[in-house]
Image: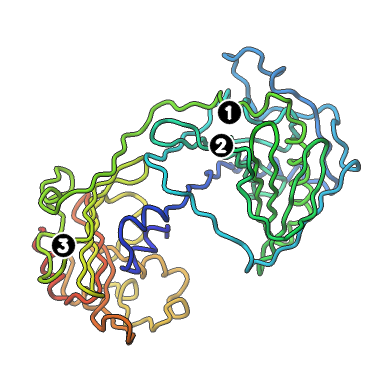
Amino acid sequence: MNTTQLFESFGSLDDDILQNSEKKPTAAKWLTAAACLALIAAAVFTLPRVGTDNAANVSSDPSASVDVMQYTANKTSIDDSEWEMYTNSVSSDMMTDSARLYTPGYFTEELSEDELISVIPGQIISWMSYEGISSFNGEGELLDVDLDITTRTPDCSINVNISGSETPACYVYGSSPEVSVCGDVEYTVYEFQHSDAVTLEAYAAFNGACFTFTVTADSGDMDTVRADFKSVLECFACYSSDKPDLDAVTYETIPQWFDNRLTYNKALQDVDFGEYMLQSVPTGFREESVRRYKDQYSDYLSGLWTQGYCEISWRVSRFSESDESRLTSVSDRENYDLSLYPIPRADSVPEEKREIVDDPIFDISELTAEAVWARAYMIDDAGDTDGYRMSFSVRYGDILVHVSAKGIDPDWLFDRLTELK
């Protein structure tokens, strides 16, 4: 479940809050089975030595086709005995989850091979391969670059974020963290202990860019992962003075994007989603916001209305392949009937059912008033409404309507949904 879906399920946040809480998409994982086998075959117990294959020498012709996967080391530049990677221990309750600030028109593109060469270090170890994405705002200005670097542990990669900021966008968890000096680069490294995993994070600023390194692995794999993490830091410490060349990272096309505030009447006339908008507002409710939004990742029409503590949120979008897992038949009550799952539902809903129980999708051809009532529940809270709360979605062919309501009669909501047929 993504952040927006989670917030929508609460039924208490308007579109402005949702938009500002959207997370930055993480770099995709492109590891293949063949790559995993290669990593297993290459696994050793000593720290690999770093080579000096300079990317500029490998590809002096910008039009040349260079297979980054095939870079191999042939000479040591920084020996691991020359520096010590100190890790500052931090408990998991001190970790901070940083959200990307709202960026109008935010979009990403995969890095081309030439773009990869412009940002990866000249030092490459034989078990390393690189993939990456670039992030832009709606005007095509580069925000940052995310690299995924393979390790010798299958299904475990190191993420490297590179931005043009002169100040590291990091969190200092201690008042005076110990710094690790590798060549001319100062790294601040943190280690977070989870119940069954460990996260390593490192921060540095050099050559006019800010770098953030992150990897999470099972506790049992950490000896190898720590060694690989240290090797990656060595590689980036061997950057030439003109790396990274972020000016070489450009966009191919800017996806269409807009963010329009509409009147309710204008929303009903929207050519894409207007006929699936809430057709009548509950008596006494006032309009908080009606919005038509589109970017690379989202395309929707939404509205929020309130009356005191009561509210109704209505969002119309395209039904996508990612929604398929939440589609349920009304006969499969374990997928949506909240009477089967007492509050707190974090304890009562099986882990494998949480996504679909949180926001089930009914096909309009099957939707019944009984199914809507099965989504309704009350909470005894003196500081809030004592009315019914509901949250679910309905599919109309290739259109998806998500509703979240508080203090709304379930039968009234059922009538509004079925009248759209």
Q: Which mark is residue 365?
A: 3
Q: Residue at x 28, y 44 (%)?
A: 259
Displayed quadrant of residue 187: top right
At horizontal 43% and vertical 76% (from top left) the residue drawn is 349
- Counting residues from the N terminus, which is met first, the one under dot 2 or under dot 1? 2
Residue 105 place in picture, x, y as percent:
37, 39
In the image as oriented, which residue stretches furthest toward the right? 81
| Total labels drawn | 3
Q: Amino acid at mark 2?
A: Val
**Label 1 secondary element:** helix
Residue indicated by mark 2: 145
Give 24 or 340, whichever is nearer the viewer: 24
Q: Are marks 3 and 1 in contact (CB under 8 Å)?
A: no
Q: Tell me which numbered mark, 3 or 2, is placed earlier along the sequence.
A: 2
Q: Residues within 10 Å of mark 1 (few under 14, many from 20)?
A: many
Which residue is label 1 attached to?
246
Measured as percent of width and height from the top left, residue 103 is found at 42, 43
Instruction: Indicate the amino acid at tag 3.
Output: Ser
Q: Nearer the viewer, residue 330 or 88?
A: 88
Q: Nearer the viewer, mark 3 or mark 2?
A: 2
Q: Distance of mark 3 from mark 1, alpha carbons?
A: 52 Å
Snapshot quadrant of residue 276: bottom left
Circles 2 and 1 in contact, beta carbons < 8 Å: yes
Kind of residue indicated by mark 1:
Leu
Q: What element does badge 2 sit on?
A: strand
The image position of residue 339, as x and y in percent, is 32, 83
Whole-Å distance between the Cαs marked 2 and 1?
8 Å
Quick one: 376 or 289, which is closer to the camera? 289
Q: Residues within 10 Å of mark 2 (few under 14, many from 20)?
A: many
Looking at the image, is 377 positioned above or below residue 92? below
Q: Position of residue 119 (x, y in %)?
A: 63, 30
